[in-house]
Structures are given as structure tokens and as C-alpha cells.
Amino acid sequence: MGHVTRRMLGGGLAAAWIARPALAQTMVLRAAHTNAIGEVQDEGLKFMDRRLREITSGRLGLQIYPNGQLGNELPMVEGVALGTIDLAVPSHAAFANFVREYQLLDMPFLIRDYAHLARVAGTPAIGQLATAAQARGFRVLGLYSSGVRHIMTRDPVNTMADLRGKKIRTQQNPVHVAAFNAFGANATPLAYGELYSAIQVGVVDGAEAAYTNFVAQKFYEVAKYWTTVGWLSLTAPVVLSERKFQSLAPDLRAALVQAGEESAVFERQFVVDGEAQLAQQVRGFGVTIVDPDKAPFQAAARPLYDRFLQTDADKARLRMVQETA
């Protein structure tokens, strides 16, 4: 009897010892984005990883795959839907291919500046977009900024007329294609990972981009003209599959929501803080910077609002954003 008891106790202690490391293990979510290491989305996810580990005492964290390691934006979102990627930060322009309502944020010149974006991010309009995403199987944890978009080209673009016939790379998004065609360009959708070489060899004459991309991806080496038209404030939702979200313990779900929103606030401010420094760097790279008359661009883009925002719900959200002071 004593022998059996000792054996059972020994087995129980061994089982407890074996179980202890499992309790301390971190659940790691695979998080993908297309920015370079140190660029804005990368820094946002690093912040989110730190906060997750703090909030959960090390039970939940992120493993970050930058620079399109797990695919360009459309395959990245497909990976989230399929469960091969846990979390991704696509541009809203790419995400709109899966959740049409995000086309609201594609309307040219809708977001007036970074301060306006920060206020808009907390409105019911953005909450409704997240609800639409949830109905399609995506949980949106926050809204990052990918910067205000300008135009980089191989040759000078001083006015909108200078874009006529130029092949300008856009994202694979119907509003972006329509906008640049309206500006007089030949809009050319192309995967982001192919863009540098496409400009270098003349497959395209230029592209729309933000300061952060222009510097981090070294596009200034192949596009020496930078036209600050500010046609769009590009955002990037932080998305997780709803199925994955619901599979987690309630406290881990709450931690994801908290860390996602905190990281979005951090990341948007990181973009603001870095932009003046990036603009100064661009001048140092020998790039010609042009500040064009924006009125012709704004006039050309105006018909796109009626063309792409047709439902009553779309129009109500548009008014909500426009009326956000």
C-alpha cells in the first residue's frame, strides 16, 4: 500500500512538474504586414506585442513578419480568412476588396489632416465599418495610419496636366484606379513588392505613396520627383479572424481589444511625429519637391463620391466623417 501510494504521489508530482511549463507558455499570434522593419506599421505591432505581454503577464504575444514575408496585402488578408495568418495590417484600400464598406476611406481628400483622422477613428462611422468586417469574419482591433499619400515620379509633375498619359501605380482598388484615371494618368495596379523594380525599369512612370514608404523602401533612388498633392490619408485596419478571436479565453480577447486600440493611438502619433523628419530626409536625397495647386485634383475627384458611395448607409457615414470637426 505504501509502495503504491509513493508511486502515485511520485507520478502526481512528476505530472505537476511537467504541466508547469505549459502554464507559463506564451501563445504567439503570427502578425503580418508589408512595411519595412522600423516603418510605421512595424512599430505599431511592436508596441502591440509589448502591451499584450504586459497585460496578460506573458500569456499572449505577437511574432511579427514584416516586409511582405507572408505575402502582399490581398494574400495576407486571405491568409487571415483561411487561418494561416492570425493577424494582419492591410491598407484599408486592400481590405475594401473583402469588406466593401471600407471604400468610404478611399474617398480622395476626405480626411483633412492627421488631427482629423484621430477624431474620425473614434466615430460611430468607423465602428460601423468594423461591424461590417465582423459580419464577414474579421475582427478589427484598431485603425493605423499609413500616411498622407503624394505622387512620386521619374519625371516632373508640376500640375495635374503633367500626369496625362503617365502610368502611375495604384493599389488594386477600384476607387484608386478611378481617381488616377480622373487625374489624367493611366492608373496601373501593381503588387507593392514589385514597385521599386517597376519604376526602375520604366514599367510604370511613378506611383502614389506616403513619406514613410518613399524613405523606408528607398523609392527616392528611382523616383526623383515628389509632388505633395495629399490626395488620400491612407489607413490600415489591424485585423484578426473572428473565428480565432472567439477561440481565445475572455481575458485574452479583452487584452487584444485593449492592446489593439492602444497601439493604434501610438502608431498614428508615430506617423505624425516622424513625418517632418522624413520630409527633411527627402530633401537631402536630392529629390525635387513640388507643391501643386490641389484644386484641379479635388474637382476631378468629386464625382467619385457619388459613383462609389451609393447606399443610404454609405452616405450617412460620409456625412458623419465630413461633419467631424
Image: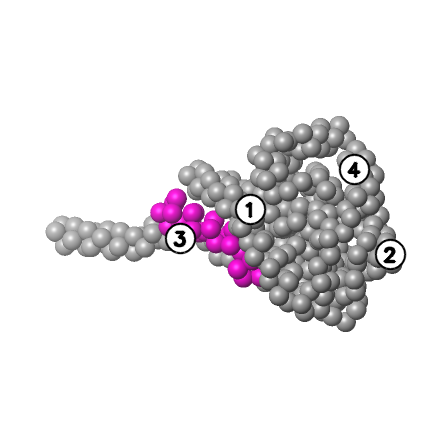
| Crowd tier of the residue under label 1, counting other residues whose Cα lies within 10 Å: few below 14, some 14–19, many 20 or above | many
Upstream in sequence: badge 1 or badge 2: 2
- Between 123 and 69, the one lying in front of the other is 123
Residue at image point 35% right, 47% down: 57
Upstream in sequence: badge 3 or badge 2: 3
- With 290 as the anchor, is 120 left or right in this view? left
Residue hosting label 4:
305
Residue hosting label 1:
268
Residue hosting label 2:
164
Task: Determine the CA span between mark 3 and mark 1.
Answer: 28 Å
Task: Determine the CA span between mark 3 and mark 4.
Answer: 46 Å
Residue hosting label 3:
26
Residue 287 quadrant: bottom right
Q: Do the residues bearing badges 3 and 4 touch, measured as CB atoms within 8 Å?
A: no
Give the image location of residue 51, x and y in percent.
42, 47
The residue type indicated by label 1 comes to: Arg
Residue at image point 81% right, 39% down: 302
Task: Determine the CA span between mark 4 and mark 1.
Answer: 25 Å
Front position among marks 2 and 4: 2
Question: Which contiguous range is marked in magenta?
Answer: 35-61
Give the structural element (helix, strand or loop) at label 4: helix
The residue type indicated by label 4 comes to: Tyr
Give the structural element (helix, strand or loop) at label 3: loop
